[in-house]
Amino acid sequence: MNHKHRKTLHAVFSHPLSGNISIKDVEHVFSELGAEMDHGHGGKLMVKLAGHKVSFNEHSHSLEKDEVIQIRKYLETCGVDPAKDYPLA
């Protein structure tokens, strides 16, 4: 995973929550993590990672904080730990 993707992943897990994360950047992170993705009807992004499925709204603006929380919880469910598995150093 390159540095930009690691920064995005860490931004999803940051405290306080970042309000400046693009869904496209998160898509790249999902891809780097090996997720299967499909763009569904109605602007939905369906993601399958580590046997867990979820869908997210796709839009052109930055993610809302509740969407960032949803992505964070999904990644935690999938066993992703950015501090341990993808350090920024």
Image (cartoon, rainbow, N blue to C red):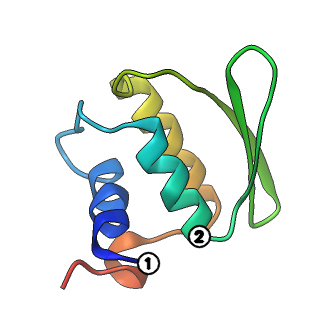
Within 10 Å of disc 1 (Cα), the crowding (few <14, some 14-19, many 20+) is few
Quadrant that contains the C terminus: bottom left
State whether residue 72 appears in this view.
no
| SS for callout 2 | loop
| SS for callout 1 | loop
Residue at the image position 37 percent from the left and 59 percent from the top: 9
Tag 1 residue: 1
- The label shown at residue 62 is none
Residue type at mark 1: give it: Met
Q: In the rendered image of this protein, does residue 47 appear above or below residue 50?
A: above
Within 10 Å of disc 2 (Cα), the crowding (few <14, some 14-19, many 20+) is some
- The label shown at residue 33 is 2
Quadrant that contains the N terminus: bottom left
Residue at the image position 46 percent from the left and 29 percent from the top: 67
Say left or right for 46 vs 64: right
Disc 1 to disc 2, C-alpha distance: 8 Å
